[in-house]
Image: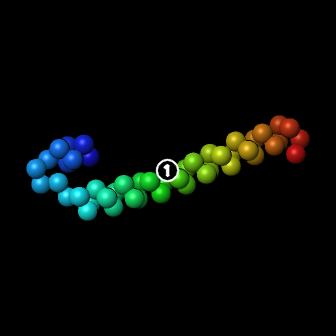
Amino acid sequence: MFDEIAADDTDHDRLASLNKKYGMLSLVELVLMIAIVLTMSGIRWGF
């Protein structure tokens, strides 16, 4: 991806769509990790 940014004929629309797709994926992963940590903490604390 970094090679594409430095290239002369960079496809900015494609890079924008990739950033949007992987950005949403990162948000979903973050929510899942927080849910797992909260669940494990709740079980440990007896909730």
* Furthest residue in direction top, as rendered: 44
Alpha-carbon neighbours of circle 1 within 10 Å: few (<14), some, or many (≥20)? few
Q: Residue at x 55, y 50 (%)?
A: 29
Q: Residue at x 47, y 57 (%)?
A: 24
Residue ID for mark 1: 26
Along the line of sight, which residue is nearer the eye, 39 or 15?
Answer: 15
Residue 3 placement, left or right of 36: left
Residue 41 placement, left or right of 10: right
Residue 30, image x, y percentages:
57, 48
Along the line of sight, which residue is nearer the eye, 14 or 44?
Answer: 14
Q: How many numbered dots are placed on residues in this image?
A: 1
Along the line of sight, which residue is nearer the eye, 9 or 39?
Answer: 9
* Furthest residue in direction right, as rendered: 46
Residue 12 placement, left or right of 22: left
Question: Which quarter of the picture shows residue 37?
Answer: top right
Residue 43, image x, y percentages:
82, 42
Question: Which quarter of the picture shows residue 19?
Answer: bottom left
Residue 23, image x, y percentages:
44, 54
Along the line of sight, which residue is nearer the eye, 36 or 4?
Answer: 4
Above/below status of 10 relative to 45? below
Q: Residue at x 78, y 39 (%)?
A: 41
Q: Secondary structure at mark 1?
A: helix
